[in-house]
Amino acid sequence: MFGFARKLWSDPEPVASHVPRGVRVYAVGDIHGRLDLLDQLLAQIDRDAVSGADLVKYLVFLGDYVDRGPDSAMVIERLCREPLPGFGAIHLRGNHEAAMMDFIEKPEAGPDWLEYGGRATLASYGVPAPAEDAPPEHVEEARQRFAAALPPHHRAFLAGLRSSVAIGDYLFVHAGIRPGLPLHRQRDEDLLWIRREFLTSHLDHGKLVVHGHTIVEQPDIRSNRIGIDTGAYASNRLTALVLEGGERRFLCTI
């Protein structure tokens, strides 16, 4: 468990931010097919929640459930069900879910998604992945087999993912936001994909942004954002940010 988060470069601490009274939020970073780490972290959260028995508790998953790790299909299955009894669950869309659905709907998207880690996702659904130098007809065959193998409730889950959610003074997104653009005018493309312009901005975004997408060794706490993608698929470190009142702390699988 993280007792604190080491900052990666000098930046003021976030201004005081709060979630509503009587609420505790657990925001979970990028899972990337690591069912083992998801189960470990959910068990930690379940134990931690004992101290807030009278609180309304939310799980906010920041996206990138699939690709790279070995168990994308089982991660989606786990999230489709009630992750933890007594918790509300909010599932956000990551760029990897968007790329995965593009692969199903648009054949030309195949090479990009496969390069992003889609081969591991295909394997988790029992679909042989085409070789890196496979001809287009082999990629198309894999696309058709994958579309047939994706269970209807997985497809419905993926179609229902949200782009963002605000709770109190916090905004939860996958990648970040376009600095200087009002929150109600943000584009999905930025919410799922943005990096440099968001990561280097010192602007006050109106809410403290909690995000994944960009891997950091430990939670990255800045004046206007908190990044919690700790590279679970490679590091074995899946992180959750815990928010209650004006307090924040972290849980982690190692």
Image (cartoon, rainbow, N blue to C red):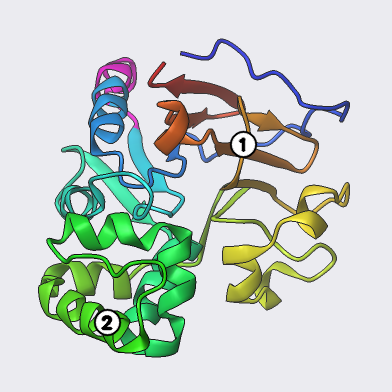
Packing grade of label 2 (10 A; few <14, some 14-19, many >=20) is some
Pinpoint residue 20: horizontal percent, then vertical percent.
52, 40
Q: Nearer the viewer, residue 128 or 184?
A: 128
Pinpoint residue 207: horizontal percent, then vertical percent.
70, 51
Can you say whether 217 is above or below 204 in the image? above
Q: Quadrant of residue 86?
A: top left
Q: Amino acid at mark 1?
A: His
Residue 48 magenta-highlighted? yes
Pointers 2 and 1 in contact (CB under 8 A)?
no
Q: Which residues are magenta?
A: 46-55
Give the number of the disc on residue 248.
none
Pinpoint residue 54: horizontal percent, then vertical percent.
29, 26
Residue that mark 2 sits on: 138
Whether residue 61 sits left or right of residue 188 in the image: it is: left
Q: Nearer the viewer, residue 80 or 244?
A: 80
Packing grade of label 1 (10 A; few <14, some 14-19, many >=20) is some
Distance of mark 2 from mark 1, alpha carbons? 51 Å
Can you say whether 178 is above or below 31 in the image? below
Give the number of the disc on residue 18.
1
Q: Amino acid at mark 2?
A: His
